[in-house]
Image (tube, rainbow, N blue to C red):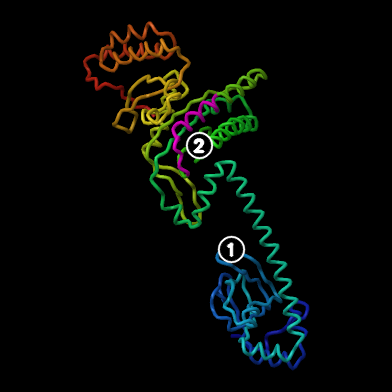
Amino acid sequence: MTDKTIFRINPAKNPFLGNLPEAAMEELMSRARILSLKEGDVFIREGEPSDSIYFVNFGEVTILKGDVEIDRQGAGGVIGEMGVLTGAPRSATIMCGSEVELLCIMAHDFIRIVDSQPAMLRNLVIDQLKKVTSSHAVRENQGRQIVEAKEVFGRLVSPEVYERVISKRKPEEMLSGTLEDAAVLFFDIRGFSNASEKMGPQPLLKALNEHLAIINARVAKHRGTIVNFIGDAVLAIFGCPVPLPDAAAAAVRCYLEARAELEAFHAERRRTGEHCFELGAGINYGGLVSGAIGSKERLSYSVLGDEVNLAARLEGLTRHYPTEVIFSESCYDQLPEDLKKQSLLMDRCTVKGRKSPTGLYTLLPMADAEMKAYDAALNKYLTGDFLAAESAFNSIPGPLAAYMRRRCGQLQVEQGKFWPGYYSWEVK
């Protein structure tokens, strides 16, 4: 507590008290305490009894409703007056935003002085009007920020996803995570590293963003969520946080539409002499953990699990097989008939870090007769009859059959090794 004779009221900074008659000021000062507080100190808490009123001599205080800042008061500000006059509990929490000096008067003393000084009541009304105006401006600004945040978030996810995420208002709910069945699409745009040697940074970034914009629009159309942009790759999920009964089909159709639009985009780039890029995609379906990674202060929505890793491995295998997309057996099993008819089982394998084999499916423009011939050749290959399979693949046109024919030749050289009925990949 400070000696009362040190406290001085500047009418310019505190018109509320500075213009009081001398007798009223002397009585007020005789019953007041002077408090010196540090930045971060809290001197009023929401819900507490309104047993005193505070006048800010210097410094700044922050008014919080919950954890949201709704106003600030500086020198000359009056804090806690409405609770004192009405007898209601404190309606907000007040924290020091800097070093602060306050004049504290108990409620019953303040009311007695107000009763004897009608001008004080008029000043209280004027002060309240200023606070309402200031608080309204703060809330308008917060409202604009919320709208802007929603617009940014809405570019990444569908409206259904947005509503599902914001319904979990507490960080703990997002951090808990949930186990869900979903489809994972790992989409890679290749060649940006090499292109950086030929293109400047600005044209390169512009080209990348144009590619990602096309993929993002297709993901949103099919009610998916982009979890992450990983350099020139996109990780998207379908089926969480909003459940989708046709998640696998949504992921495959998303890929098909994005590929078609990107091919048209590349055709235009070739026409104008601009650099073009290759594409690759891996799709898987299965159980994964979805939720927020991080802390209450900073969260990042993500998905985890072996099924996510498998999608990434399948995308990596498109660098070896002559196809742009590979999806797993579990994804194929979830597809409707129209997509199953377009799908081709091209191999069975294990991927690096995973012991269980999966069928590798793709989508290629092959005639029905060619698909049946490929299926027959693949059956010979899977049973270990590599000589017959090589001959069968030799009669089928296209780069995929030629690739598998070479595989059969390789396996004949390794004939002494045990053949489990599937190929083992050790690359990522």
Look at label 1 and name its amino acid.
Val
Element assignment for label 2: strand
Element assignment for label 1: strand
Residue that label 1 marks: 68
222 and 95: which is toward the camera: 222
- Quick check: 190 left or right of 175? right
Q: Quadrant of residue 172?
A: bottom left
**Picture layout, residue 348 above or below residue 51:** above
Residue that label 2 marks: 230
Residue at figure coordinates x 71%, y 84% from the top left: 8
x%, y% of residue 199?
62, 26
Q: Quadrant of residue 221?
A: top right
Classify the position of the C terminus by image quarter. Answer: top left
Return the disc, 1 or 2, that comes first in the chain's sequence: 1
- Few, some or many C-alpha atoms within 10 Å of disc 1 (few <14, some 14-19, many ≥20)? few
Does the magenta portion include 115? Answer: no
Residue 102 numbered mark, or none: none
